Image: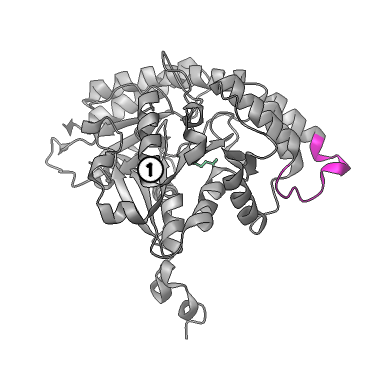
Amino acid sequence: MDFVGEKIANRLGGKNFDPSKKSYKFMKIKSAKAELKLKYPDAKIIDLGVGEPDIQADSKVVDVLCNEAGKIENRWYADNGIQEFKDAAAKYLKRVYGICNVDPNNEIMHGIGSKPILAMIPLCFINSGDVILTTVPGYPVIANHTRYLGGEVYNLPLYKENNYYPDFSNIPDDILKRAKLLYINYPNNPTGQVATREFYEEVIDFAKRNDIFVISDASYSALTFDDYKPLSFLSVDGAKEVGAEVYSLSKAFNMTGWRLAFIVGNKRFIDLYADVKSTIDSGQFIAIQKAGICALNNVDITHNNCERYSRRHDLLVCALREVGFDVTKPKATFYCYAPIPKGTKCGKIFTNAEDASSYILENAFISTVPWDDAGAFLRFSVTFEAKDYEEEKKIVDEVKERLLKLELVF
Ligand SMILES: Cc1ncc(COP(=O)(O)O)c(C=O)c1O
């Protein structure tokens, strides 16, 4: 008898649950890379796949953690967080996004990364049969947890023809009636698209007309380039009435492994989230929250990242275009998003993005992320490891050379 299998929840496939069929896409990609490494131990894989900053947290931030980690008063469960972190978050929102109407005592709550924050939100709202609206392709956490609770997920595809914005005009009435949440994410992973003030106004209007709460995932919102300045959903009139916004220190401050984020919204919603959160975790280590304060007070860390990523995008976009990809430099995020090639000169035809991505990984040792939700696209991330411009150029030249050798057809 399969002692465990007999008891596995239906939402995970019941006794058919198969750990080799990873439910989290990025775990699958990590496994594919690991397998290739085993097969070809000497191969140098160029990782344009997983979206994590290639450099570590700023030394000022690390120093604060080292100092604070040893202080006896920081040893406690942090529960729903320290007030100093909330105060620093409010100041950060004012400094970077010009948001002045946030009450740090009642309208901000930290989280152990934005991933668990997003995972807890369905617990606040979703009963069986309720609906969430979510843009696809995108970060799947809110959708997965909605399904776990018996909720229904209605996808809003981000098509190139619609500039990677959702079209709210085609949603069936029955879905709109049952919808409780709308998840949006701009600057967007994976398309790299940014929001405009007009788009956010449209979202607020849609939310009010249909009585839907909006979750804006602002994980990449400070990583902007060229003439685009960070724009927050919450900075638009009426947003706080109808929604909340999630900010992460992971990407803007090179702190993915540290697990620190915060959510901002009206008091009623924050009370709800805080209640759920208090039953799930006991807060991030206070020393990490204090290091997070240091990061939030040093936005030059993000500015340096923006400069680095912008420079790398310039190189990569140029190289990918020479290979034949139809790609433009994004205004934010570290992602370049391009339609897949049709196939190769030697007759290989790509059936979808997953097929194209696997082919490129196996034949050029370049890791990308495939997206097949709204057309077939590849995501190239400029977070590859390189310590200066010379190394960046060398890697991008190598990417170009390897891709050219594949003789891709577009
Ligand atoms: C759109 C988006 N939201 C949220 C996250 C989670 O970020 P974290 O949990 O590190 O704050 C990611 C991570 O890749 C992401 O791409």
Residue 34 seen by the camera: no
Q: Is residue 357 left or right of residue 185?
A: left
Place of residue 228 in the rendered image (x, y in percent of width and height, measured from the top left): 42, 17
Residue 395 quadrant: top left
Place of residue 405 in the rendered image (x, y in percent of width and height, measured from the top left): 24, 30
Q: Is residue 268 left or right of residue 294?
A: left
In the image, 143 versus 329, the foreground residue is 143
Q: Quadrant of the C terminus?
A: top left
On the image, numbered disc 1 is attached to which residue? 138
User: Element under label 1?
Assistant: loop
Residue 313 seen by the camera: yes
In the image, 16 versus 163, the foreground residue is 163
Crowding near the residue tagged with mark 1, few <14, some 14–19, many ≥20 C-alpha atoms within 10 Å: many
Residue for point 58% across, 43% down: 113
Q: Residue furthest right?
A: 72
In the image, 26 versus 343, the foreground residue is 26
Q: Residue furthest front?
A: 209
The residues colored magenta run 68-81
Magenta highlight on residue 136: no
| Amino acid type assigned to the residue bearing label 1 in the image | Gly
Q: Residue furthest bottom?
A: 1
Residue for point 15% across, 43% down: 348
Q: Main secondary structure of the magenta part?
A: loop
Residue 82 quadrant: top right
Place of residue 359 in the rendered image (x, y in percent of width and height, measured from the top left): 27, 43
Residue 150 quadrant: bottom left
